[in-house]
Amino acid sequence: MTATATPPQTRPSVSPPSRREDLTPARRARRLNVGRIIAWAALIVLLFVTLFPFYWMLRTALSTNTALYTNAGSLLPVEFSWGGFARVLGLSSPEQAAAEGGTTGSINFWLYLRNTVIVATVITVGQVLFSSMAAYAFARLEWKGRDAVFFLFLTALMIPPIFVQLPNFILVRDLGLLNTLAGIILPFFFMTPFAIFFMRQFFLGISREVEESAKIDGAGHLRIFFRIVLPMSSTPVFTLALLTYITAWGEYFWPLLVGRADDSRVLTVALGIFRSQTPQTGPDWAGLMAGTLVAALPIFVLFILFGRKLVDNLGYSGIK
Amino acid sequence: MNTRTRSLDTRAIVAPRTARRRRGDARIALFFIAPAALGFIAFYLVPSLRGIWFSFTDQNLIGAGKFIGLDNYTRMFGDPLFWNALWVTLEYVVINIGVQTVLAVGIAVLMHRLTRSAVVRGIILLPYLVANVVVALVWFWMMDYSTGIINVFLDFVGGDRMAFFGNENLAIPTIALINVWRYVGYTALLVFAGLQTIPTQLYEAAALDGASEVRMFRSITLPLLRPVLALVLVITVVGSFQIFDTVAVTTEGGPINSTRVIYYYIYQQAFERFDLGYASAMSVFLLIVLAVVAYFQLKIMRSNSSDLA
């Protein structure tokens, strides 16, 4: 896709001003209206299907687990209780948990939350910075073999991650980093082909004039990049950072391979283990849903704060 | 694509510079690219070569493997579970991508014609923000046989309860549709962005000629959207082949291998059977399959030429 420095254009609504000449105004209005009503109805159904599971998480998490089995159809929480959250956050005693039909196994939620925050933050900072630097070299600097190297980087976009993750597991093992946060972070820390591609597209679109005038003032590329280009690119940098953070937060496969031990476990892996530990008969749905909610909560907060920017910029962000 | 021409343009502008200037760039370029290059070499390039090497060895999780020739590959071609995994994955990809693409285009056109509201787009993007694992668990609960709300609802309206995850024939479609729910909004927004590049005048002219909404969609929207659709499809298909998370936290490959997708089978061979060599052979095969699929997709969709130009 092409990238431009300008945000996606907003065009006036394209509903055609006139239809066939032979339609009377009344008929035309009716035809338009019926179509529009159906379209709006479809959109509302879509929004409902999108939002309902989120409501159901909340409704379940606020119910008493044993009561869920007797009143499965209730649209409101059944026997309202904070028990699910209390169990997940480690605030309830085993006896209390058992009484509510919850799992009594211990879940070290705060540790997993801390791990996830560290992993996602460090990955985002490293990946965005180093990928932007590389993207600048690909977009703006002149050096031999540039396009060939860029193409080589791009081919990595098509590699199924598992293909490199099997050898990466052996590498992390040999480095002695199994069951450490560093082991989870490293492969994503320096770059992803997507991040470089994304930033390069943006840098290609920036006008050269600003750089040229800075160069005349005697600024080197380092200064130009960090003082001029990077600040100018705050919007795509921000969009990329948010996407990277969301992806790192939700990553499951790689942490499952190298971070199974308790002290390096992230939330996704913990949720998977929580689910497999819950008994086959009468699982702790309230606790499980409370767990999924708190795991998703930080991303919701980020989205409420910055979602507008993300939604507006997906246009030229291209494809992930 | 534009990228290509643009970078050529850039070079044309820069060309008259002196050789000294260029050498200066090379040194600073090395600095800019060094961290990313380190990451690329350590975690993409070398592992790729190593992965191919592993596929010819009996590598396990602990020691170093020894060369065993084509044994892993001959075993793979004779392994019914491998072929089953490929077949199940294909089934998943076809349902997932088919439904998702049609819905995404529909949603994008709907938004394009009805509303530009950022709130609507925000809500549509919401499922994409949530981890696969979370999405899988929520739907696993909602589709539970006895107490899941969907089965309670089916019961209520007089239908039959369905064992979404317990029935061999339903499990893959169920998982495919769950992931449609997660990704369709994101895909729709990408298509939506593509729609905004289509000049409004085309629709106005078509409307003057008395073209119907359906006709405009077929004759204007679809052809002009093709390059965007091609790229979206290549990326989503490659992503779809990587289905793992949802299976891992719900069915774990069952019932009776019906959801043992290729990613999950490779994972099991490597980390439950400790047979990294065999797992590597299968991932080499997966790599080749994906490369072929992507190649033909781009070829068929002629993605690099737009009818707009």
Image: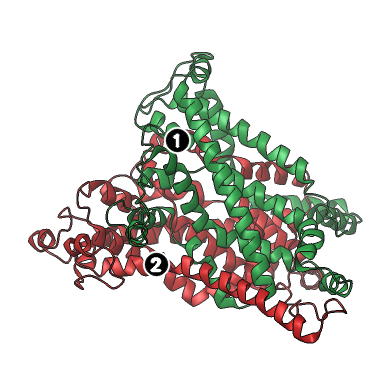
Q: Nearer the viewer, mark 1 or mark 2?
A: 2
Task: Please give left or right for residue A111 compared with residue B32 in the image.
Answer: left
Q: Which residue is mark 2?
A: A54
Query: In terms of sequence position, does the residue under pointer 1 or pointer 2 come before the other?
Result: 2
Residue at x-position 62% and y-position 72%:
A39
**Among the 4 quarters of the image, the one containing residue A96:** bottom left
Any part of residue A230 in sight: no
Relative depth, front residue between B3 and B213: B213
**Among the 4 quarters of the image, the one containing residue B120:** bottom right
Quadrant housing the N terminus of chain A: bottom right
Q: Which residue is mark 1?
A: A171
Looking at the image, the residue that sits furthest to the bottom is: A25
Give the letter of the green chain: B
Q: Position of residue A169 (x, y in %)?
A: 43, 36
In the rendered image, the vertical position of residue A36 relative to residue B264, given as above or below: below
Q: Position of residue B149 (x, y in %)?
A: 33, 61
Quadrant housing the C terminus of chain A: bottom right
- Residue type at mark 2 is Phe
Q: Secondary structure at mark 2?
A: helix
**Among the 4 quarters of the image, the one containing residue A291:** bottom left
Give the letter of the red chain: A
- Residue type at mark 1 is Leu
Relative depth, front residue between A39 and A226: A39
Q: Within 10 Å of the Cα at label 1, are there few (<14), some (14-19), or many (20+) other Cα atoms?
A: some
